[in-house]
Image (cartoon, grey):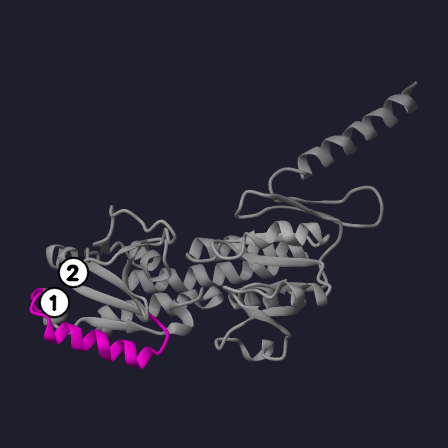
Amino acid sequence: MKIIKSVMLLVLTIVLVSIIGCGGNAVTQPAGDGTEIVITDDAGRRVKLTKRPERIVVCSVSFLEPLQLVGGTVVGRATSQMVPEFAKDIPQIGKAVQIDVEKVLALNPDLVIINKGMNEKLVKLFEDNGIPSIVIKARTYEDVKRELNIMAQLTGQPDKAAAAIKSMDERIAAIKAKLPKEEKRVAILFSSSQGLNIQLKGSIAGSISHDFGWKNIAEGLTPMEKNPDATPYSLETMVEQNPEVIFVVTMGNAQSLEQDLLKEFKSNPAWNTVEAVQKNRVYFLPQDTFLINPGLKYPECYEKMAKMVYPELF
């Protein structure tokens, strides 16, 4: 009888451990030799993988460095001019905004990582072809930390993700500690061939400004329908809110866009009433880290913006 009770207790313990292990984004060990990975992605989907992916395709180049850090193997990537050196020879699958599905399928991936807000329409297509996918949002620093942890689950390298996050947290904390405790009124413009918009705190520069405790003049304005990280540009708003500092992110020919915007500042009397323009506090941010997600370079973005506003402290 004692033996039977012991066996029953052992079975119950195993069942309870298995149930607990299935919660959230846990990695569990099912019956058999395989590893079952269960991930809740940034689209709220619960994705189950029966083994660790060995052939990953990414729909954004911003996923490359985090994956390399935790030991992921990428066999296909989006086309971009801003690609890390180690990934330049990886086969391309088209631009992030226009992924070539046939090229993806030809690579025979066992996982596709999709950029939230850009490629979700491909999820069902890949599912229909038996290819699992996860959707990841990677804009703010908090997004990046979550992204790293998800990718570490895929590769079974949580310690590497934890170490990277700790290092980034410490670097960012050191930068923030140097800044005076004062509220700066800032505006973040996004300039492209399509015109201007004003970035909100969900953007890269917007999230950093928010973390610094600066006041984004666009706070409270209605986001654009197709771009929740921005609001429509309004010169009246700029004049009324009178930012002390203006940051500009460009997409396209950076030099040409900068020249056009500076020309507009000089020629338009309304712009000349804005403090940031009057005092030459208009700063153009580099495309390679502020246009696409900077990933592991987020501390560099914090330092870049802080140094522009307070050069004497760095």
**Percent position of residue 113, x then y:** 60, 58
**Percent position of residue 125, x then y:** 64, 53
Q: Which mark is residue 146?
A: none
Q: Is residue 219 magenta?
A: no
Q: Which residues are magenta?
A: 250-273
- Considering the numbered disc 1 on the image, is that residue within a helix, a strand or a loop? helix
* Residue 102 vertical position relative to residue 153 in the rendered view, above or below: below
* Circle 1/circle 2 CB separation < 8 Å: yes
User: What is the quadrant of residue 217 in the picture?
Assistant: bottom left
- Considering the numbered disc 2 on the image, is that residue within a helix, a strand or a loop? helix
Q: Quadrant of the C terminus?
A: bottom left
Of pointers 1 and 2, the one earlier in the residue sequence: 2
> In percent of the image, x 28 and y 60: which residue is there?
197
Q: Amino acid at mark 1?
A: Trp
Residue that mark 2 sits on: 235
Q: Nearer the viewer, residue 269 or 113?
A: 269
Count neighbours of disc 2 (C-alpha within 10 A) and say few if under 14, some if 14 to 19, many if 20 or more.
Answer: few
Residue that mark 1 sits on: 271
Seen as rendered, the residue at the extreme top is 1
Q: Amino acid at mark 2?
A: Leu
